[in-house]
Image: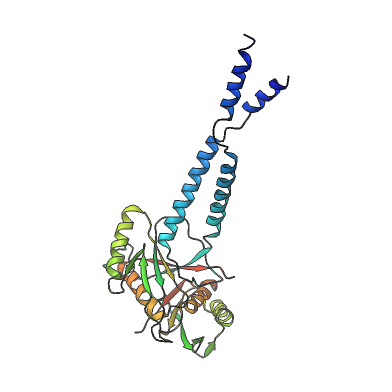
Amino acid sequence: MSSYQPKGRRRMRAAAHVGPNMTPMVDVVMVILIFFMLGSSFASPDWYLTNNTPAIKGGLSKNVKVQKMPATRILIKLTQIGSHTRASIAAFQTEDLSGQLLKWLKAKKKAAGKNVQVLISPANDVPYQQVITTYSDCVQAQYTHVAFSYTH
Amino acid sequence: MSRRGITPMQSEHVNVTPLIDVVMCLIIFFLLVGHIAKKAEVKGVRIPSTKHGKDLAGKSGQLIINLVPRPPLVVGQQRSPKVIIWGERISYDLLPGKLRQYVNEYKHSHTVVKLVIRADKSIQYKYIAPVLIDCASVGISSIHFMTRRPG
């Protein structure tokens, strides 16, 4: 009996050591997990500007409404001069789209009130960035009726 | 005495198997989500920056129209961009029909279809406007322009 006991202990100890060491694997897997978690949180810095389109009868939309055009209208013409984009509203002209134009729009909004239609009319060669900046100004100045025009 | 001390220490090891199961599931989840996001959003598009914008509530129901610029053949003349929806390249002529098809499919699986325009900031307006007109002709009532925060 006394000679049997040490043998059994040796067997138990050997069984406890069988199997791979999981520690390095857990380390690596945790690093991968943290990488993906951080990556997914940094991967979506996008935000959005929403624009209501005039839905056309015969399309897929069920909510086609006939809307009255607001009485006051502001036409913002965008033209490309070299690498600069110029915004013209009647006599007012500026190339500072996110500064001067925004100020003008805010001032006009105060004077004109709620019922104003803004029409952005970019020339064909105006870059998308400038169109979006102008639209962002309109949204920031709290105009609710903003549309885009297009001439071939 | 020393042998008694060794045996309990070996049995006190933490069982990491469930932890690895959970962590592996999380990794597979993030890999799949990343893969799906990549498929919807095409590389090579420099999103325009704006000071104003808002987050869309949830990514569900988003139909993203990617407008990817192509290198010019003649210096100073921009070529029409590639229009890509869910990895499928669509020509400008076929866009209204394809949009109608996608919107119909989306309406079956989603309560709200959020149409997102994801265009490169350098693309000229003459290539953006036809897409807006096609969206209106299909009957989409609101369009979301994808932008990014400045900086």
Please say which color scheme the image uses: rainbow
In which image quadrant can residue B141 be found? bottom left
Position of the C terminus of chain A by quadrant: bottom left
Position of the N terminus of chain A by quadrant: top right
Residue at the image point whose x is 63% and y is 27% from the top: B10
Where is residue A53 shown, x and y percent of the image? Answer: 38, 70
Identify which residue, A37 or A18, lies in the foreground.
A18
Where is residue A133 shown, x and y percent of the image? Answer: 51, 76
Specify whether residue A67 is in view: no
Q: Is residue A59 left or right of residue B55?
A: left
Q: Is residue B75 left or right of residue B3?
A: left
* Image vertical order of residue A89 relative to residue A27, above or below: below
- Residue ranking furthest to the front: A3
- Residue ranking furthest to the top: A1
Q: Is residue A9 left or right of residue B79?
A: right
Where is residue A112 shown, x and y percent of the image? Answer: 52, 78
Task: Give the number of marks.
Answer: 0
In which image quadrant can residue B137 be found? bottom left
Specify whether residue A145 is in view: yes
Where is residue A140 shown, x and y percent of the image? Answer: 54, 72
Identify which residue, A147 or B78, lies in the foreground.
B78
Residue at the image point whose x is 55% and y is 59% from the top: A42
Identify which residue, B125 or A116, lies in the foreground.
B125
* Image vertical order of residue A3 relative to residue A79, above or below: above
